[in-house]
């Protein structure tokens, strides 16, 4: 039997502080996980894939040998090596897309939508490059977009999705929409929302069962005077 006295209790007045502490801990956990994902992705791209590609080139050159048995072995081995290179490249992209670090959020979202289109996902994207956006914020917005639109659509919860990325002198705004029938945010979306808010971002969301979902993420520039960037038109929070 579990002894309830082993669990600490807190008053209603302490609840906000406890919740804030839990959100901070979750934010730190997400940040650490993202750093680990980036480290693994860099290793796969810069070391593993490059080494295997060099081996593939080397073995392919051996194919000119007059040894028939060796050529047959190479004919069997080279496709397997090529498949491994492709698989590791895809794994690295799933962990963290190169475009996010090399070019920025706009390009990473473009590539994600294009990859989704090739898989039959009907997601529209409108946006432009956002210079000087901190990497941690770009990553948070990218993960939020994946959870809110691309992932939900790939799970057949919606047939259409839309992403809009806007930058103004006051801040950056990402609007995510889909026509899924979900009655509220998934745990993954809630987690990304908590993480984004810990970065001084603001989230407004509208969940309409049977109609669709709209999530607006706003990150103000640190020196911006306005607290509501124009052009975002964030919707009001409503319970799911």
Image: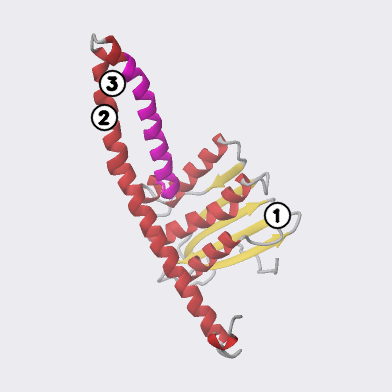
Pick the residue in front: 138 or 185: 185
| Residue drawn 41% across the image and 47% down it | 97
Quote the CA–CA distance across marks 3 and 2: 8 Å
User: Where 112 sits versus 7, above or below?
Assistant: above
Look at the image and tell me whether residue 203 can be seen: yes
The disc, 1 or 2, on the residue closer to the chain's N-terminal end is 2
Judging by the rendered image, the residue that carries numbered circle 3 is 60
Look at the image and tell me whether residue 167 can be seen: no
The disc, 3 or 2, on the residue closer to the chain's N-terminal end is 2
| Residue drawn 57% across the image and 60% down it | 189
| Residue drawn 53% across the image and 52% down it | 146
Residue 66 on image: x %, y %: 23, 8
Residue 116 on image: x %, y %: 55, 40
Q: Which mark is residue 212?
A: 1
Judging by the rendered image, the residue that carries numbered circle 2 is 55
Residue 149 on image: x %, y %: 59, 51
Residue 187 on image: x %, y %: 59, 62
Label 1 neighbour load within 10 Å: few <14, some 14-19, many 20+: many
Quote the CA–CA distance across marks 3 and 1: 52 Å
Image quarter of residue 221: bottom left
Closer mark to the observer between disc 1 and disc 2: 2
The disc, 3 or 1, on the residue closer to the chain's N-terminal end is 3
What is the magenta segment's predominant secondary structure?
helix
**Range drawn in magenta:** 72-97
**Quadrant position of the C terminus in the picture:** bottom right
Q: Which mark is residue 74?
A: none
Image quarter of residue 58: top left
Closer mark to the observer between disc 3 and disc 1: 3
């Amino acid at each position: 039997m579990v002894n309830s006295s082993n669990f600490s209790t807190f008053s209603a007045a302490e609840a906000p502080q406890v919740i804030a502490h839990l959100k901070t801990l979750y934010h730190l956990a997400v940040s650490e996980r993202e750093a680990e994902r980036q480290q693994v992705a860099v290793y796969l791209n810069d070391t593993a894939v490059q080494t295997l590609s060099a081996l593939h080139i080397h073995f392919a050159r051996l194919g000119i040998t007059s040894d028939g048995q060796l050529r047959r072995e190479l004919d069997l081995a080279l496709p397997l090596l090529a498949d491994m290179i492709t698989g590791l490249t895809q794994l690295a992209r799933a962990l963290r897309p190169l475009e996010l670090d090399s070019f920025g959020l706009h390009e990473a979202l473009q590539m994600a939508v294009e990859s989704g289109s090739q898989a039959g996902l009907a997601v529209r994207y409108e946006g432009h490059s956002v210079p000087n956006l901190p990497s941690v914020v770009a990553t948070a917005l990218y993960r939020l977009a994946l959870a809110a639109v691309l992932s939900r659509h790939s799970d057949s919860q919606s047939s259409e999705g839309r992403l809009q990325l806007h930058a103004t002198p006051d801040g950056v705004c990402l609007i995510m929409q889909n026509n899924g029938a979900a009655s509220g945010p998934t745990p993954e979306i809630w987690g990304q929302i908590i993480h984004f808010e810990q970065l001084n971002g603001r989230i407004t969301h509208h969940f309409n069962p049977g109609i669709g979902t709209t999530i607006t993420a706003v990150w103000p520039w640190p020196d911006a005077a306005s607290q509501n960037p124009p052009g975002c038109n964030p919707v009001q929070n409503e319970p799911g």
